[in-house]
Image (tube, rainbow, N blue to C red):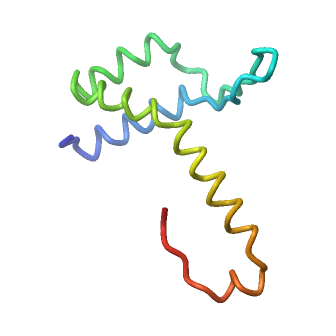
Amino acid sequence: MGLTPLQIDEVRSTMRDIDFYGTSPGADGSFFILVTGDKWPPSDADVRLRGLLGEDGFRRREEYGKTVNAREFAVQIASALYLSIPAHVRTGGSWCQL
């Protein structure tokens, strides 16, 4: 996106200040969210990030955010595959990056 090192630091700082972790909804529709930052209400953070990234960069960030579930699923599958191999085999082999 052509951001300067200072802009990259600002984006990282803003994201760290608003970042949260959640779980997928349970059978009853409830879920758990852990908020790790409290400096920026989401609407203020969006305005700040839009200003830092520009409209196109902000849209790209939003699109990337939609891939979280697929990325988490890939990590779970890779972990299950890795852990299904006996320890003496997986310590000596080489692995490809998914």
Residue closest to the far top: 43
Above or below, comparing residue 98 to residue 18 in the picture: below
Q: Residue at x 66, y 51 (%)?
A: 76
Q: Residue at x 69, y 28 (%)?
A: 24
Above or below, comparing residue 95 to residue 19 in the picture: below
Above or below, comparing residue 81 to residue 48 in the picture: below
Q: Position of residue 15 (x, y in %)?
A: 47, 32
In which quarter of the view is residue 18 placed?
top right
In which quarter of the view is residue 9 placed?
top left
Judged left or right of residue 75, residue 88 is right
Q: Position of residue 16 (x, y in %)?
A: 52, 35
Residue closest to the far left: 2
Depth order, front residue of 98/55: 98
Q: Residue at x 80, y 21 (%)?
A: 27
Q: Position of residue 39 (x, y in %)?
A: 55, 20
Judged left or right of residue 23, residue 94 is left
Depth order, front residue of 98/40: 98
Judged left or right of residue 38, residue 85 is right
Judged left or right of residue 26, residue 8 is left
